[in-house]
Image (tube, rainbow, N blue to C red):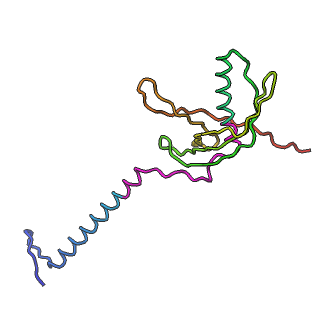
Amino acid sequence: MGEQTFPTGQSFPVDLINLIKSYQRRLLTWLTLGLICLSLNACQSSPPPLEFAPDGAVVQQAITFQLNRTQTALSQHLNAPTPDFEISKINVKNIEAIAVDNLPAYHLTGGYDLKLILPRQTVTQKQNPFDLYLQRQSEGKSWRLLKRDIDPRTNEEKWGSYLVELEATEPPSAS
């Protein structure tokens, strides 16, 4: 077994030096692989689980919010009263878990039936399409409707966010 002499006067077996160098290379390799894996995971955000997707009440309120905004704007433009409406038979056809601004969100598409109650008549429309982006707030108690907008100054796409207010349900009274 050969020995190598160091300037301090100590001598170590060459096999021990090669063993230490081998462990250093392995450690460096594992650290490099770990950093690569960590950086790859940091670059991608995993979609939220579909189990946390919004329920029917949230979808109905989001559709109601959109219709209220549209009907109000149209009524103001036409200088007419805003009609009442009823939404029924909501059919969610697709739910996609996505990330918007690095936060979990859901893209839902489907259809619903709409009854417009006008002053002189009632109009029923079957299977109106909807396309919603919904995001649960961090505390998990509320949802926000997300809308893609174009920033007029920069002409870049951005997301607008609107609170979806759920109707309060009263607990059943004890009789």
Residue projecting furthest to the right? 175
**Looking at the picture, how far across and down is residue 155, in whole percent?**
42, 27
**Looking at the picture, how far across and down is residue 107, in whole percent?**
57, 44
Left or right of residue 26, residue 56 in this image: right
User: Residue drawn at (36%, 53%), measured in percent from left and top?
Assistant: 39
State the count of labels: 0
Residue projecting furthest to the bottom? 1
Please name whichever residue, 11 or 55, is drawn nearer the observer in this view of the structure: 55
- Quarter of the image for residue 171 reads top right
Please name whichever residue, 55 or 87, is drawn nearer the observer in this view of the structure: 87
Left or right of residue 12, residue 41 in this image: right
**Looking at the picture, how far across and down is residue 136, in whole percent?**
59, 43
- Quarter of the image for residue 33 reads bottom left
Q: Tell me: residue 70, above or below residue 88.
A: above
Left or right of residue 39, residue 96 in this image: right
User: Residue drawn at (51%, 34%), measured in percent from left and top?
Assistant: 159
Looking at the rendered image, the quarter that the N terminus falls into is bottom left
Please name whichever residue, 149 or 123, is drawn nearer the observer in this view of the structure: 123
Q: Which is the main secondary structure of the residues drawn in magenta?
A: helix
Left or right of residue 165, residue 41 in this image: left
- Quarter of the image for residue 84 reads top right
User: Residue drawn at (62%, 50%), measured in percent from left and top?
Assistant: 52
Q: Tell me: residue 38, above or below residue 22.
A: above
Please name whichever residue, 102 or 56, is drawn nearer the observer in this view of the structure: 56
Question: What segment is highlighted magenta in the picture?
Answer: 37-62
User: Residue drawn at (45%, 24%), measured in percent from left and top?
Assistant: 152
Looking at the rendered image, the quarter that the C terminus falls into is top right
The magenta stretch spans residue 4: no
The magenta stretch spans residue 43: yes
**Looking at the picture, how far across and down is residue 12, in whole percent?**
14, 76
